[in-house]
Each structure stands twice: as C-alpha cells, then as structure tokens.
Image: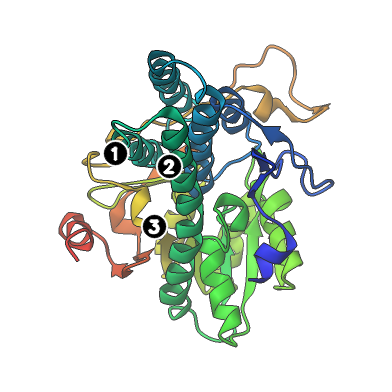
Amino acid sequence: MAEQEKFATLRWRNGKLEMLDQRALPEQCLYPTFDSAQTVAEGIRSMVVRGAPAIGCAAAYGIALEALRLQTQPPKSFADGLQSAFEILAQSRPTAVNLFWALDRMRAKLAAQHGSDAEHAAAALLAEAHFILEEDIVLNRLMGQHGGALLHDGARVLTHCNAGALATAGHGTALGVIRSAVESGKKISVIADETRPFLQGARLTVWELLQDNIPVTLIADSAAGLLMSRSEVDAVIVGADRVAANGDVANKIGTYSLAVLARLHAIPFYVACPLSTIDLKIASGAGIPIEERAPEEVTGYRDQRWAPAGVNVRNPVFDVTPAELVSGLITERGVVIAPDREKIARLFRS
C-alpha cells in the first residue's frame, strides 16, 4: 500500500528490530536498532514509537528479541529472563492497553511451547510478533473500509494527535479511515490539530498526509472551535489508546474538548480503534490510568524553552471522552453507533 511503500513504522532487519524514530520527524527519517526487551521498553518510554497499536507490536518484538538473546541459556535462565522481559515491557507505558494485549498474546504463545527447547520457543515467539504486525495492517484496512463509508465526498475531517501509519503497523486507524475514503475515489481534506505539547499532529500527521498527497491544513489546537462554529468541519475522527467496557474513550489530551465542541455544533465525532484497544476489564473511563509525563514537555520543545524556571506543571497526556459524546466507534467488525456497554459486548460475541 502507498504508506507502506514510503515508510515503515517498525521493520525487522538482520535479526533486530528497527523503529522509525518519531522524535526526529519531520526533519529526519532515522531507524535506530533494538536488540532486547530493555531497549524496546526504552524506545516505547522515550516516544521513539508511540500510538497504541504500534506500541503493542513493538512490545511483541521486545519479547521475541529477548527470547532470541537468551535461547542458548539454560532453561531456568531462559524462563526467568523472559519473565523479567514481560515485566519491563509492561511498565513502559500505562495507558495504551494494546501493550498489555500484545504481551498477553506473547505469554500465550510461550505457554503453548511447553516442552519445546528454547530455540524453538524463540522462533515461535518471533513468528507471533510478525503475525501481530501483519494482522494489525489487515485490521486497519477493515476499519478503513467501514469508516470510509461514513464520509461523504468532499468531507472536511478534523483529527487530533496522530492515528495513522506511524501509530500502527501500517495504514492507520483514524487516518486509515481517511486513506480508505480517498482510495475509494472521494475527495477528502483534513484539518490537523497541532496536538500540544508533543506536537504529534504538526510533526507526524501532517507529514504522513503529505506523503500521500492528501490535502491537509494545520491549525492550533485552540482554533478547532472557531472552525466548527463557521461550519468548516464535517466530521471529527480520532484514534484511541484504551476504550472502557461502557464506551468511554481514553485518547490524547485535548480529545475530550473536541468531543464537547463537536456535540455543541452537531458534528459527528468518531473513534477508530481495533478490538484490541477495547478493555472489557475496565468498567468505565474512571478506571483508566492516565499517564503524566515530564514537565519539560510543557515548558518548551527540544532545545527551546519558553516557560520561566520553577513554574509548577501538570502534564497529563491523555483524557477520557464519555461514551455519550461518541457518535460511532469504528472497529474491524463494523461501526457501533452511539456505543454503550451492551453494544460493545456484542462486538466480542460476533
């Protein structure tokens, strides 16, 4: 597909994992190499890779890398080392549930290798990591097909943060819907929030869309309400880092504000996410852990600092949008209009 031809978020080369360093974009395309669970966890923690599905894929590879690294060790050392790898990776980011979903997949695959030697177990874990990555692209394309049908020809779509190929194994969730609509022949234009403080919209979403020649306009986060009030937005589509069993959505900070604005202006607000992002163990958004990151991300960017030294800072990087503000949840199994607990449960029974 077009986005995969131009760049890969994660790639397996010469027995190692390479991840496109999203901190360097859009100025440089750098692919640092990762060879262990510890280095992958640091890559996740430091935002080399971000976006819930991509984090899940990276974590799967982190386990596979550790298994390959330990495959010549005695059985107990192999088992203990992998247990430590699971713990290290689980601590890398708290909000994105795909991380824990992928680790559970890898635990199940490891358990299925009971009785096999370490070399065969490592090969099976690597195969599972490859499968998780390939599966993610397939699911994103299914979401794109379902969600693309919601957009009319000529639609102006507002998006927040980056929920594209950079946040997944390829194609994207929210941007995947837009890409699929464009592929179907519709003329779609995008309005991208800059997404402070880490500027994922300005640096990543705009870069992605320019690669695919999809018309995009960058705005300050605070400009979204004005454009909605002037009838310049036809739909809002975002991704998600975790969806609770009742349909509450945790996504990049600022998403909740957009949902409130969209409701006020009668604009549909859609969330695109695979079923692996839905956490049935969390009853509502109140139970979703909200990560807070370093104050330096708010007081400046890279080498530029604009806030005075010593100021108190809060830097929550996610917020929770109540289900009643979500017009539709776009999944690989279809679109759930006005999601609630029963409709979401039904998704997992189909």
Vertical placement of 172 versus 65: above or below? below
**Residue in the foreground of this view, choosing between 8 and 314:** 8
Residue 280, visible in the rendered structure: yes
Amino acid type indicated by mark 2 = Ala
- The Cα atoms of the two marked residues, 2 and 1, are separated by 9 Å
How many numbered marks appear? Answer: 3
**Residue in the foreground of this view, choosing between 3 and 324:** 3
- Residue at figure coordinates x 64%, y 41% from the top left: 196
Q: Which residue is mark 1?
A: 112
- Percent of width and height locating residue 127: 47, 47
**Which label lies toward us, 2 or 3?**
2
- Residue at figure coordinates x 43%, y 28% from the top left: 118
Residue 296 falls in image quadrant: top right
Secondary element under disc 3, as helix, strand or loop, is loop
- Residue at figure coordinates x 50%, y 26% from the top left: 71
- C-beta proximity under 8 Å, tags 2 and 1: yes
Q: Which residue is mark 3?
A: 274
Secondary element under disc 1, as helix, strand or loop, is loop
Amino acid type indicated by mark 1 = Ala
**Upstream in sequence: badge 2 or badge 1:** 1
Q: Quadrant of the N terminus?
A: bottom right
Amino acid type indicated by mark 3 = Pro
